[in-house]
Image (cartoon, rainbow, N blue to C red):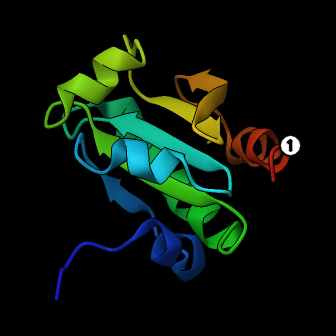
Amino acid sequence: MSSQRSAAQAASDGKPLTLTDANFEQTIHQPTPVLVDFWAPWCGPCRMVAPSVEKLAQEFAGRAIVGKLNVDENPMTAQRYRVMSIPTLIIFKNGQPVDQIVGTQPYPVLQQRLAKFV
């Protein structure tokens, strides 16, 4: 049995999905909106945004997928979406980026931006 959670499980269990170069494309082509947090462990602002990302996963469980992609471990995906600064949050719908948030934002701003696509 795989220890990796599927996108469907992530959408319903209220926890961010760990994304990689290997599972990214499959994940963003889900019928529900997908918010991806591009981050790195050494990034202070990324650590500031992390609790909000966790909270979004809980609040939008069953309605959206929230995932986290470590840009140091998965540089191909970060380069493909031209992530130059972290944290960067990109919202995908039907595999296409529909919104992008660069830098730290308060939770209500992130909540409102994701809610537009749910």
Image position, residue 75 (x, y; %) = 20, 25
Dividing the picture into quarters, in which one does residue 93 lie?
A: top right
Residue pictured at 52% horizontal, 81% vertical? 13
Which quarter of the figure has residue 92? Answer: top right
Of 19 and 41, nearer the camera is 19
Closer to the camera in the image, 77 or 73: 77
Residue at x 70% of width, y 69% of height? 59
The residue tagged 1 is 116
Picture coordinates of residue 45 (x, y %)?
Answer: 40, 31
Which amino acid, mark 1?
Lys
Q: Tag 1, which secondary structure?
A: loop
Question: Label 1: how many residues lie within 10 Å, few (<14), some (14-19) or many (20+)?
Answer: few
- The percent coordinates of residue 89 (x first, y second) are 53, 33
| The N terminus sits in image quarter | bottom left
In the image, residue 44 above or below residue 52:
above
Q: Position of residue 73 (x, y in %)?
A: 13, 37
| Residue 75 horizontal side relative to residue 33, left or right | left
Say which residue appears at 30% left-offset and 28% top-offset: 77
In this view, 47 is above or below 102: below
Q: Quadrant of residue 41?
A: top left
- Name the foreground residue: 32 vs 74: 32
Classify residue 39 as left or right of residue 102: left
